[in-house]
């Protein structure tokens, strides 16, 4: 059974999961990693979640304010040994629910073209590709998405 707990970025399990994410992204992003890493600091994230399987942390995600009407999904990760079991979708759904509770009407996110599984997850969750925004404009590896929350 998977449980999802809400927390903030100071939670020990969230920090641990993000460290695994950063190690994986350093390999995937290669020379672009330093650029992306500059926009992925967790010290100011107030809305984070950790997914647990049999009491052990296996995934995480977070949202942060993007605009007056949108939250940005950040720091999504699921442990490689338990991927493709719906945990990513559960995390995204919990983050969307939290954004709704906070009165936001949409979520946006950025992911890398070298992460086809992440792109497939976001499309499966109903996200539509949009032009790259903010610091991701002109970044060949970046793909941006948005979803209106009902």
Image (cartoon, rainbow, N blue to C red):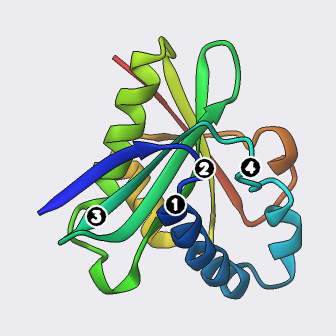
First of labels 4, 3 by sequence position: 4
Residue at image location 30% in from the left, 53% down from the top:
89
Measured along the vertical axis of the image, is residue 111 above or below residue 116?
Answer: above
The residue beneath circle 2 is: 9
Q: Where the N terminus falls, by quadrant? A: bottom left
Q: Element type at marker 1?
A: helix
Q: Quick check: marks 1 and 2 in contact, CB under 8 Å?
A: yes
The residue beneath circle 3 is: 52
Could you classify mark 2 by the number of other residues whose Cα lies within 10 Å: few (under 14), some (14-19), or many (20 or more)?
Answer: many
In the image, 139: left or right of 125?
right
Could you classify mark 1 by the number of other residues whose Cα lies within 10 Å: few (under 14), some (14-19), or many (20 or more)?
Answer: many
On the image, the x and y values in percent for residue 107 come to: 53, 31
On the image, the x and y values in percent for residue 5 come to: 34, 47
Q: Element type at marker 2?
A: loop
Q: Quick check: marks 4 and 2 in contact, CB under 8 Å?
A: yes
The residue beneath circle 4 is: 43
């Amino acid at each position: 059974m998977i449980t999802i707990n809400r927390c903030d970025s100071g939670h020990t399990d969230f920090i641990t999961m993000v460290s695994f994410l950063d190690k994986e992204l350093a390999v995937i992003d290669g020379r672009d990693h330093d650029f992306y890493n500059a926009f992925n600091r967790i010290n100011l994230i107030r809305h984070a979640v950790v997914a647990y399987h049999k009491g052990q942390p296996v995934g995480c995600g977070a949202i942060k304010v993007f605009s007056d009407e949108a939250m940005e999904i950040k720091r999504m990760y699921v442990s490689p040994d338990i991927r493709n079991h719906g945990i990513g979708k559960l995390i995204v759904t919990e983050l969307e629910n939290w954004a709704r509770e906070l009165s936001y009407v949409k979520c946006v996110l950025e992911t890398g073209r070298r992460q086809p599984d992440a792109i497939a997850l976001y499309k499966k969750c109903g996200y539509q590709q949009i032009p790259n925004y903010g610091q991701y404009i002109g970044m060949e590896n970046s793909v941006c998405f948005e979803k209106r929350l009902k």
